[in-house]
Image (tube, rainbow, N blue to C red):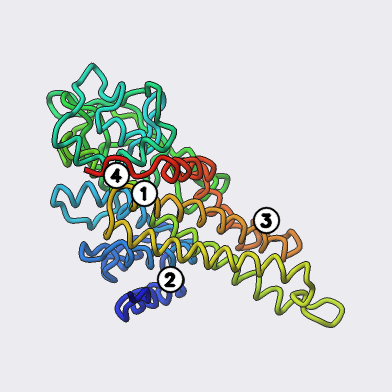
């Protein structure tokens, strides 16, 4: 079996790296999005491995493009409805007092306890069986043995959506917003035009965790929407969304870690004290060597996860994605912290560009759960076994 990248994949990766190195993908640049479309980064023919190669380079560049939110969070639902993906888009799922993770929404879509506001019926039969692969991850994510709050965002008979969504990535950039909501017969995925929304940024600007990846909340008050995914397919699409989003973030985390490591090793080789590079000291060299091992391990796991999203299903794909998620997040924070230490502690200041990657690493470390949460899910997948794979 050949585990190497193909020539086309290498060309895609190198083209993305060259484009991003030119610095044209700047914040607030409409041309940058047009360039991404022109470069083929949204082409439906791209598999998750190809998307992961792009995500890695975007992470390395610290890009503010809403690309990941579009292809990772929104594209699975848009693609399931046969809609082209060309405009910036995102997914709104988390709710205060309701399901606040993608795993919780998979449980709700599959007819879990309290899954539908207003007493909607749980799904049974073939639709439930088809979603069982996605349900495996949901069960492992601290899902057993207790009732869970149901969705509070609801779809009215006229198709309007009402509710409150929080922690929506790139909502301020999105022209199309996929909204997870409870309908009369179960969870639905609905499409809302971004022009109808008034997002409230909660983690943006110079004091946000990551100024290049804004997060917002929004009140939906009888907002017009169109159906994308019906209740009988919602669990499957949400499971794919979770796998793809996490796999791409793992690749992005590898890019962040690689950039931090490259910055640190370059400084260790060029900065001299007492007539020799500081990298000649074991106290500097050894931590960087350990980080190198973490980064390369995380890269292998991220590529494996990206391949699994398309080539495997159910527990096998979940296991690969969750493993890569934990490894990449830890590698990103470890690499940034080692780089800051290599710079003598100055790397945490706003004047030092390394600061931007450290903030992205911490954003990644908290998206839809902590590293501890994903390690607990991984333990559940390993200890509980594959279960029913119908």
Looking at this rendering, what residue extends furthest in the right direction? 274
Task: From the top left corner, tell me how far across and down residue 128 is, in percent.
Answer: 20, 35
Give the answer, above or below, for where 182 lies relative to 292: above
Q: Nearer the viewer, mark 4 or mark 3?
A: 4
Quarter of the image with the C terminus is top left
Which residue is identified by label 3?
348
Say how many tags the image has.
4
Which residue is identified by label 2?
20
Mark pair 3, 1: CA separation: 35 Å
Q: Which mark is drawn over residue 239?
A: 4
Secondary element under disc 4, as helix, strand or loop, is helix
Mark pair 2, 4: CA separation: 31 Å
Mark pair 1, 4: CA separation: 9 Å
Secondary element under disc 3, as helix, strand or loop, is helix
Q: Which mark is drawn over residue 318?
A: 1
Q: Does label 3 or label 2 sit earlier along the sequence? A: 2
Q: Does label 2 or label 4 sit earlier along the sequence? A: 2
Task: From the top left corner, tell me how far across and down residue 22 is, in percent.
Answer: 45, 75
Q: Residue at x 29, y 44 (%)?
A: 239
Give the answer, above or below, for where 310 lies relative to 223: below
């Amino acid at each position: 079996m050949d585990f190497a990248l193909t020539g086309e994949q290498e060309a895609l990766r190198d083209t993305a790296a060259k484009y991003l190195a030119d610095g044209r993908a700047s914040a607030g640049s409409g041309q940058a999005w047009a360039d991404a479309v022109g470069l083929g980064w949204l082409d439906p023919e791209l598999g998750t491995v190809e998307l992961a190669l792009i995500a890695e380079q975007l992470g390395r560049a610290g890009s503010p493009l809403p690309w990941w939110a579009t292809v990772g969070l929104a594209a699975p639902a848009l693609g399931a409805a046969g809609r082209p993906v060309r405009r910036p888009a995102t997914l709104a799922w988390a709710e205060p007092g309701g399901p606040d993770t993608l795993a919780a929404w998979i449980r709700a879509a599959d007819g879990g306890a309290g899954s539908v506001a207003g007493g909607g019926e749980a799904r049974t039969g073939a639709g439930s069986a088809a979603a069982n692969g996605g349900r495996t991850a949901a069960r492992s994510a601290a899902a057993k043995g207790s009732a869970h709050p149901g969705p509070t965002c609801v779809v009215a008979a006229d198709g309007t959506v009402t509710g409150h969504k929080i922690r929506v990535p790139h909502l301020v950039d999105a022209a199309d917003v996929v909204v997870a909501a409870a309908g009369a017969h179960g969870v639905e995925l609905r499409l809302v035009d971004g022009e109808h929304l008034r997002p409230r940024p909660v983690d943006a600007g110079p004091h946000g965790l990551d100024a290049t990846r804004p997060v917002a909340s929004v009140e939906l008050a009888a907002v017009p929407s169109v159906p994308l995914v019906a209740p009988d397919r919602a669990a499957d699409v949400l499971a794919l969304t979770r796998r793809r989003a996490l796999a791409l973030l793992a690749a992005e985390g590898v890019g962040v870690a690689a950039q931090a490591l490259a910055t640190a090793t370059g400084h260790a080789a060029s900065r001299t004290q007492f007539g020799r590079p500081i990298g000649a000291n074991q106290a500097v060299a050894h931590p960087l060597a350990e980080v190198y091992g973490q980064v390369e391990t995380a890269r292998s796991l991220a590529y494996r996860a990206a391949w699994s999203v398309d080539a495997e299903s159910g527990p096998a794909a979940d296991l690969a994605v969750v493993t890569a998620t934990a490894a990449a997040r830890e590698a990103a924070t470890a690499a940034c912290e080692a780089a800051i230490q290599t710079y003598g502690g100055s790397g945490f200041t706003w004047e030092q560009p390394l600061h931007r990657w450290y903030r992205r690493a911490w954003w990644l470390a908290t998206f839809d759960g902590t590293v501890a949460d994903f390690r607990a899910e991984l333990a559940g997948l390993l200890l509980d076994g594959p279960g029913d794979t119908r």
